[in-house]
Image: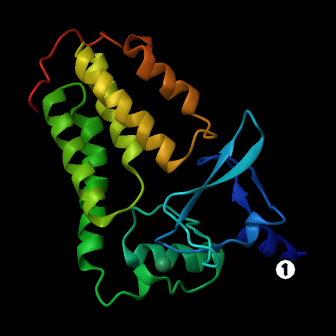
Amino acid sequence: DPQGKNTTKTNALPLGKDSIEAAVYRVISRINHSCAPNVQHSWNSIMQKEYIHATEDITAGSEILTSYISPLMTREARLKRLKEDFRFTCQCKLCAAASSKEYDAAVTRINECSDLVVKFASSNPRKSIQLVRKALALLDKIKVCGKTIFYYDGFQISAMYSNYKLAKDWADLLLESYRFEEGETGDKYGMYLAYSTDVKSHERAGCGGYVDLRGV
Ligand SMILES: [Zn+2]
């Protein structure tokens, strides 16, 4: 029935970030949403389990909150998405803040950086690394999860252009960030651990020849 279908949709978690499959859980589907969450949820396809991973210290008795959507959206876009997909008007501390100007400007810039990192990766890898660093600084400023993907960009670009010492630094940061954001139960932990152990294990290591990326 339509009622049941909506209940399933608004309470289900996708099995992995881009999955079209989803599941409803007895306990974790009850976790409420915040655009400034204190846990992350992620699907481990090997364990066939959904994991909840704290991203900050949570004192006893305080509510566990996860985000149903990407944090890298402006307030207007988040409110619209949550209304459409989950049928509520978000009143979390981030949405209720007097001004979202600074946050919105930062996420817009971070998303731009993300596109440009890919765009410049083959024509101007030094520029790509600069954009990675810019995005990481902005993520620090607004204190949201999402650094892992940029560390991964930094690692891949460095490895691709044969900067193996730099690639090792990026791989260590990548692993540390993934451990913090998703936890060791995350699907990609093993892969990132392997990169950190041997940067040349990446399939594209060295394939761009050599471009000096030091000091960027
Ligand atoms: Zn919110």
The image quarter containing residue 173 is top left
Q: Quadrant of the N terminus?
A: bottom right
Q: Residue furthest right?
A: 1
What's the residue at 80%, 74% (across, down)? 7
Identify the colour scheme used.
rainbow
Question: Which secondary structure, mark 1?
Answer: helix
The image quarter containing residue 177 is top left
Q: Count the numbered circles shown.
A: 1
Identity of the amino acid at label 1? Gln
Q: Position of residue 157 (x, y in %)?
A: 28, 25
What's the residue at 74%, 72% (across, down)? 30
Q: Quadrant of the C terminus?
A: top left
Q: Is residue 46 above or below residue 17?
A: above
Q: Which is nearer the eye, 117 or 71? A: 71
Assess disc 1: are there few (<14), some (14-19) or many (≥20) residues with their C-alpha within 10 Å of its C-alpha: few
Residue 15 lies left or right of residue 122; in this view the side is right
Q: Position of residue 97 (x, y in %)?
A: 36, 87
Q: Position of residue 187 (x, y in %)?
A: 62, 36
Q: Position of residue 191 (x, y in %)?
A: 53, 25
Q: Which is nearer the eye, 31 or 183? A: 183
Q: Which residue is mark 1?
A: 3
Residue 18 lies left or right of residue 6; in this view the side is left
Q: Is residue 124 visible?
A: no
